[in-house]
Amino acid sequence: MHRLAIAAGLLVAAALVLGACEPIVQTASPGASVTPGDSLTPGSTPGPVTTPGPTTAPSATPLPTPLIVSPAPLKADPVSLLAFVFNPIFQAFLILMVGIKAVVGDMGVTIIITTLIVRTALVPLMRRQMVSMRRMQAIAPEVKEVQRRYKNDKVKQQQATMALYKERGVSQAGCLTALLPLLLILPMYQVVREGLTAADLTESLKVFGFQVVPLTCPPPIPIHDALNHLVGFKPCIDSTISWLGGIHANAFEGFIPLPLTIPIINMTGISIFALVYTGLQLVASRMALPQHDPNTPLDQNARTQRAFAIWLPLITVLYGNVIPVGVFIYLIVSTIYQIVQQFFTTGWGGMFPIFGRTPAFAVDHKPRFPVAVPTAPTSTARPAGAPAQPNPERSSLDRTASANATIRHRGRQGRRGRRR
C-alpha cells in the first residue's frame, strides 16, 4: 500500500508539472504583419511591409511573444482538470512571494522567507511523519518475525502486521505526509519558471476578481540581442539575487564547466547549488536512519536501505542543469529546516559512525523532543514483544476441548493386540 501510494503520488506530480499553469501568449492583432527581427510596440500600428529581396530567406524560428500568466481554465481533459485544482496552490505561492518581494526587495531573501513560512506551517505534519517512521523502525524486528511465521500465507501475514501496528499505536498515514514536500516543489518550480519570467501576471494575483497584492506590470518591453534580434520580453518582476553575484532566480546559473559534455542528459557543467543540496540531502537521509551498532551485522533489507540513503541524493547532481537557481534555494533552505527538525525530534539517528568513528558530541545524545517508542502491552496469553496474532486468542475451555480432541484413547484390545 505504501509503495502504491508513492507511485500514485509521483504520477500525480508529473501530471501537475505538465499542467500546473497554462500561460496565455499574446499575439499580434489580426491582419498585422511584423518583420522578423523587429518588435511591435503595444498600441501602435504596423507600417507598410517591405517585400524582401530574392536573396532574403524567411526566418524559420518563430518570434517570441510576451508571456502572460493567468489561472488555467477548467477543461474536460485530465491535465487541465489537475491544473485547475492546482491553481490555488500556485496562486498562494505567487501572492506570498510578490508580497514579500515588495517588502524586502531581493528575490533570494524572498524565496528564503517563503520557504521558512511553508516549512513552519508543515511542522505538525512532518513531526507526525518522523514519529511514524521512528516507531516503525523500532518494531521492525517484530515485523520480520511476523513475516517469518507467516511467510507462506500472505493474507495472515498482512493481518498480523496490521494488528501489530494497531497494538503499538503506529499510524501508516503519517508516512504518506512524506509526499507533501515533493508536491510543494511543483508550485515553487512553476512560480520561478513562469511567474518570474512573465511579462504580465496580474491575473494570477486576483482572488474572486480582487487583486490581493498591489502590482502593476508595464506594457511588454522587448529585449534585443547585439544583432537587434528580438529574443524576449522583460519580466514584470525583477528576479536578481544581489548577494549571489547578481544571478537571476529564474535562470540556470552557477555551473562549474566540465571538460566534456555528458551525452543523453546533455550536461556541460555541475551546478554549485546541486552540490550543496546533495550534501545536505546525504546528512538528512542518514539522520532518518535508525542507530546501528557497527559490531552487529545488517540484514539485506537494512543494507539496501542504507545504500539508497547514500546513492539517491547523488542523482541530484545529474539533473542540476534543469533546475533554476530559485528552486535550488528553496530546496536547500527546506533541507536545512528538515535537518534541524530531525535533530530536535529523532536526534542524530544513523548519521554516525562515519568511517568507523563517532564524535564525542553524538555519543548518548538525547533529542530535545524525543519520540516515545511503543511498548508491548502486558498480556498473560503471550510474552511481551511477541508478534500479534491475526485472530483473537481462544479461551481456556476452547484450548482444553481442542487438546482432548487430539488425544487418542486406546482400548484393551489394542493393548492385547500389541502383546501378541
Image (cartoon, rainbow, N blue to C red):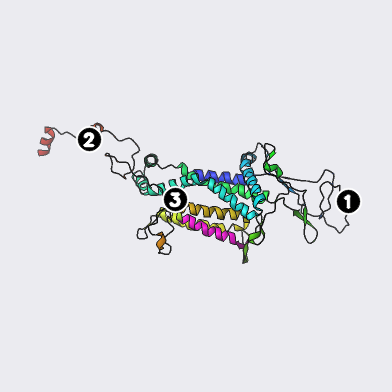
Residue 184 percent coordinates (x, y): 57, 47
Location of mark 3 (residue): 345
Q: Secondary structure at mark 2?
A: helix
Look at the image and tell me whether residue 64 can be seen: yes
Residue 96 is labelled as none
Residue 13 percent coordinates (x, y): 58, 46
The disc labelled 2 sits on which kind of residue? Ala
Q: Main secondary structure of the magenta part?
A: helix
Which residue shows up at 57% across the image and 59% down it? Answer: 274
Residue 49 is labelled as 1
User: Depth check: 184 or 269 in front?
Assistant: 184
Q: Is residue 202 left or right of residue 364?
A: right
Alpha-carbon neighbours of circle 3 within 10 Å: few (<14), some, or many (≥20)?
A: many
The disc labelled 3 sits on which kind of residue? Thr
Q: Secondary structure at mark 1?
A: loop
Residue 305 on the magenta segment:
no
Location of mark 2 (residue): 403
Residue 275 on the magenta segment:
yes
Residue 392 percent coordinates (x, y): 32, 35
Q: Is residue 62 left or right of residue 325?
A: right
State if disc 3 and disc 2 touch (CB < 8 Å).
no
User: Depth check: 172 or 345 in front?
Assistant: 345
Closer to the chain start, of discs 3 and 1, is: 1
The boundaries of the magenta stretch are 267-286
- Most extreme residue toward the front, as rendered? 103
Q: Secondary structure at mark 3?
A: helix
Q: Is residue 256 left or right of residue 56?
A: left
Disc nearest the viewer among 1 and 2: 1
Disc nearest the viewer among 2 and 3: 3
